[in-house]
Image (spheres, rainbow, N blue to C red):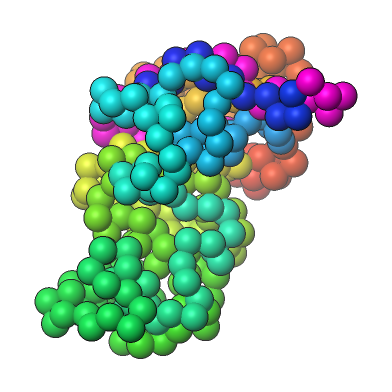
Amino acid sequence: MLKLINISKTFNKGTVNAKIALDGISLHIKKHDFVTIIGSNGAGKSTLFNAISGSFLTDTGVIELEGKDITLMPEHKRAKFIGRLFQDPMLGSAPGMSIEENLALAAGHGGWLSVTSKADKAMFREKLALLEMGLEDRMKQPVGLLSGGQRQALTLMMATINPPKLLLLDEHTAALDPATAEKVLELTKSIVKNEKLTCLMITHNMQSALELGNRTLMMNHGKIIFDIEGEPRENITVGGLLEKFKTASGTELTNDRMLLSEQEEQK
């Protein structure tokens, strides 16, 4: 479904500030895979998503989606079939537009100053009701007045209202309070399952990385150092994951948020 072949990216190449962000990554994601991605700070996780979504061109390698070479395709064209959510709830929606207008724009049926059909309004209300946040009764309200959790849930709905071929979730619950984060995660699982999406999700919560989806990747210094699925993944613990990281990288994990989440799970 998604193939990365020898993907590399170095920023500030040829200077003293040169930084290898992606180091010869090759990866094959199968259709309907739900892959969680973890790693230390600066491991290259978000950079990998930027390469897939077309935020920059890679130095080497090939990116294929459903057999089509998209390596040189501009980001705005990839956005038609690649959905993405960021950590910041403020990204991904237009604050000055209403909930209804944002959904209409995402659905490709209009947007600001456009007339939304009765059928679309009914569909939007139905989908918003699934969020259980009362937004179905506030469709004329500007998105900028929503809470972070409400806005992130809306952005998730916008990114999947026309089911994308690939959904990229870049720590999309990290900025939310625990209760809201759990609600958005449950919504994520439901949408991915019901729409049969192929999904990659970066997370700092190692327990979630093992519980969600069917496959887990671990990155370090721009490389994938560990890839686990099936029965081995079902049987591994968070502690075992930390040991695998140490064995594969030769260092201790240094992501404070990941270590804190692991400590919370042990309480």
The answer to whether residue 104 is seen in the rendering is yes
The residue furthest left is: 119
| Residue at figure coordinates x 44%, y 15% from the top left | 5
Let me know if residue 209 appears in the view.
Answer: no
Measured from the top left, where is residue 254 in percent x and y?
Answer: 76, 32
Q: Nearer the viewer, residue 82 or 184?
A: 82
- Tell me where residue 132 sits by quadrant: bottom left
**Residue 127 placed where, x, y %?**
25, 69
Please determine whether, in this image, residue 260 is positioned above or below residue 2.
Answer: below
Horizontal side of residue 197 vs 261, given as left or right: left
Q: Nearer the viewer, residue 21 or 136?
A: 21
- Residue 75 lies in the magenta-colored region: no
| In the image: residue 180, left or right of residue 263 | left
Residue occupying image coordinates x 50% and y 76%? 95
- How far across and how far down the image is residue 30, in percent? 30, 25
Residue 4 vs 31, above or below: the answer is: above
Main SS type for the magenta part?
strand
Give how far across and how far down residue 116 sits, in percent: 22, 80
Q: Quadrant of residue 78?
A: top left
- Asked whether, in this view, residue 112 is left or right of residue 15, the answer is left
Where does the magenta region start and end? 14-39
